[in-house]
Amino acid sequence: MLRAVRDAGLLSGAEYARRAPEERARLNQPGVDWLDKWVFGFAYNVEREADAVEALTAKPPDLEIPRGAWLAEVAAGQVEAIAGHPARGITLLTSGLLSCDGLWSLPRAYLRAKLYLGRANELTGDKAAACAAYAGVLERWGKAKPRSTTASEARSRATKLGCASLP
């Protein structure tokens, strides 16, 4: 959440850097495994390349993202895509999006994952797959009131790509 406050311009970069370690330290409670610590302390809601690189650096080399752990898969996929590893991002995002759990339990995370799947496919040059991912976002939130920033970004990217027949 602290990252979102910083990204909204409500917290300076210096203040974020000062407070982030103490926020992450709260994850060091008994019973919290390293996957949860990494996903929620570093990977979840990453939007910037520097944050994605930081998340990958913090990820223990032996930390596996279990297939079927949809939130971990989409968070890791988003991190990989933003950090410049679109093929790895596509694999993780696609696997995580196969679960319907995300659509019902955390629809924002689910649709942000679709947006990042589109962006990763753009980076690999797969226009058809990128357009399909953006269309999936627009089908759900394209006419949302108040307007969805996720849908607005998907529409903008799809328009720039020249995607046909958007919802």
Image (cartoon, helix red, strand yellow):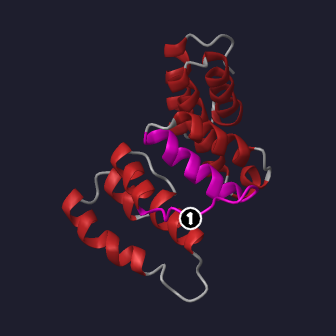
Q: Is residue 94 above or below residue 64?
A: above
The N terminus: image quadrant: bottom left
Q: Residue at x 55, y 18 (%)?
A: 125
In the image as oriented, which residue stretches furthest toward the front? 62
SS label for mark 1? loop
Q: Quadrant of residue 143?
A: top right
Q: As shown in the figure, which amino acid type bears the numbered disc 1?
A: Asp
Between 3 and 70, the one nearer to me in the picture: 70
In the image as oriented, which residue stretches furthest toward the left? 14
Residue 51 place in picture, x, y as percent = 37, 52
Residue 63 place in picture, x, y as percent = 57, 64
Q: Residue at x 61, y 43 (%)?
A: 113
Residue 28 place in picture, x, y as percent = 48, 83
Q: Residue at x 46, y 67 (%)?
A: 41
* Residue at the spot of label 1: 62
In the image as oriented, which residue stretches furthest toward the bottom? 30
Q: Residue at x 58, y 46 (%)?
A: 77
Magenta stretch, residue numbers: 58-83
Q: Is residue 107 left or right of residue 61?
A: right
